[in-house]
Image (tube, grey):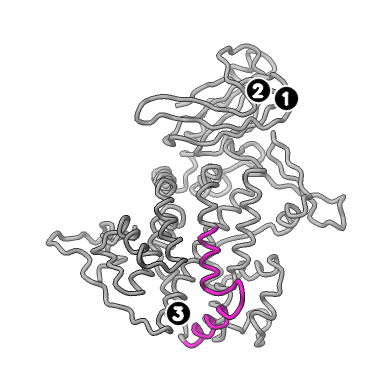
Amino acid sequence: MVHNHYIKCKVCGSITRVRLQVGHLELHPIIVACGECGVSLSGKVDIGQDRPSLSFHFENAESITAEEKVSFVVECSGEFPVDKLITVKNKEDHISSVNIISPFIRSVGRMKEEDGYEKFSKSVHGFHDTIKLWSEYKRILDLSQNENRKYLIPEIHKIFPQHIFPCENEFEIHTAIHMVEVHGFMTPLCSKVINDLTISTSVMKLDFNQLSSLIKCLNEHSGYSLESMQKLIYKMMHCFINIFPFLTPAFAIQFFKENTIDYDTECSATSDFETIKQFYLDIYEAVGTLLVIPVSLNNIKYRGNYNLFKDTEQKISLFDEFIKMSKANRYRYSLDDEQYAEYLDISVTSKLRNAIGHNDTDYDTITQMITYVPNPKDRNKKENMYLLQLEEETLRLFQALMIISEYLYRLREVELIIEGNIPQKPNTVFNNNKKIGRNSPCPCGSGRKYKKCCIDK
């Protein structure tokens, strides 16, 4: 359903017609620009799902009932990309100038799979459940970082069943804490980790002595210990909780067929550059730090030594050479076809990142075009990128971070073994006579099918 709403800019008085695609989200941001003065008309929409209701709240505009003298028309959706702002020249244009095909119909029509919208909707709603549960999840993560077992285990059992996660030893506690990432982030946003277990389990098949040496090396360097990198991941998860509602339309593009989005004519109506850029800088830096893990795992897998790099074929010190590199040079190692980097599936615009860091950017609120200086030594040369493209890159970086967190999870298992902890054989998954279908969800709560999870346990 499309709902029409009228707002008047508090700066210039221009009237804009907002064509809202009413979706299944209860609350989502709206950030559109006034076509006359360019000021951001940011706000939010409240959609009553249980009781039909609809309300708008804007910072720089007021809602009006009159339809007269409409100057601009904007589409808005909390779920999908929308058409960019349309200037209305006369009354006839006001009626006929807007594409009658709604954002929902356009988006469903270009899904790469028949059930693409259902999968997208399930992912979005799954992550909104994470947002609602975040205070409980975060308590578990905070207590785990403080190693406070007295309060940690009861908090785990408030969310995860005790008969499945008894937390009687370090391995069981480690697994239960990891379920926050599995349930809260990977299942809704990074399903390929759930569907392809080798992304994670293959780490445990690498040379144990090399893994042990890698862990020792990491733990000896400030900022790169397993504990420090785990804290960094948790920090970025916390930040992502707040930013995801602004990125939802960009997330929808991952479910579209290739080359079906037109960045010249389509945009996001839930975000702007100011909203996104700090998280983009943070996630770029975080993944740049964490790349030490997939790069060293590739060194072990393909060259038998975590210090032996692909492009040198010589033994070099991981920290004397790799860690001295700029983040941009580190990202070169995420672009090759070796297994642990290939899984990340990211590409980055490092020159844009540097331009943002040096305030060498301009942003057009109406076209959502970011203009930046790629080389500060030649300020006459500029490049462009649309906000929606930056948001896609941001999402890919966060998803890459979650994959690296899986690698880290396995390294921490190795660390537990090194410290003398013995993995315990898991108990029976279900203590009743009800048969579990092979394709049914696994009762351990992992989100995977039973046949791909605990069937052999």
In this view of the protein, which residue sits in the foreground, 101 or 37?
Answer: 37
Mark seen at residue 415: 3
Tally the marks.
3
Disc 1 from disc 2: Cα separation:
8 Å
From the image, give the main secondary structure of the stretch colored magenta.
Answer: helix
78 in the magenta segment: no
* Picture residue at 40% right of the left edge, 61% below the top: 194
User: Which amino acid, by three-letter code, is at mark 3?
Assistant: Glu
Binning the other alpha carbons within 10 Å of mark 3 as few (below 14), some (14 to 19) or many (20 upward) gives some
Percent x, y for residue 373? 80, 52
SS class of the residue under badge 1?
loop
User: Which amino acid, by three-letter code, is at mark 1?
Assistant: Glu
- Residue bearing the label numbered 2: 72
Specify the segment rendered in magenta: 209-235
**Where is residue 81, by image quadrant?**
top right
Query: Is any part of residue 90 visible from this angle?
Result: yes
In this view of the protein, which residue sits in the foreground, 52 or 343?
Answer: 52
Mark seen at residue 36: 1
Disc 1 to disc 2: CB gap under 8 Å: yes
Indicate which label's residue lies in the foreground, 3 or 2.
Answer: 3
**Where is residue 94, by image quadrant?**
top right
In this view of the protein, which residue sits in the foreground, 95 or 219?
Answer: 219
- N-terminal-most mark, 3 or 2: 2
* Picture residue at 66% right of the left edge, 69% below the top: 330
- N-terminal-most mark, 1 or 2: 1
Percent x, y for residue 77? 52, 34
If the image is split into quadrants, where does the C terminus sit?
Answer: bottom left
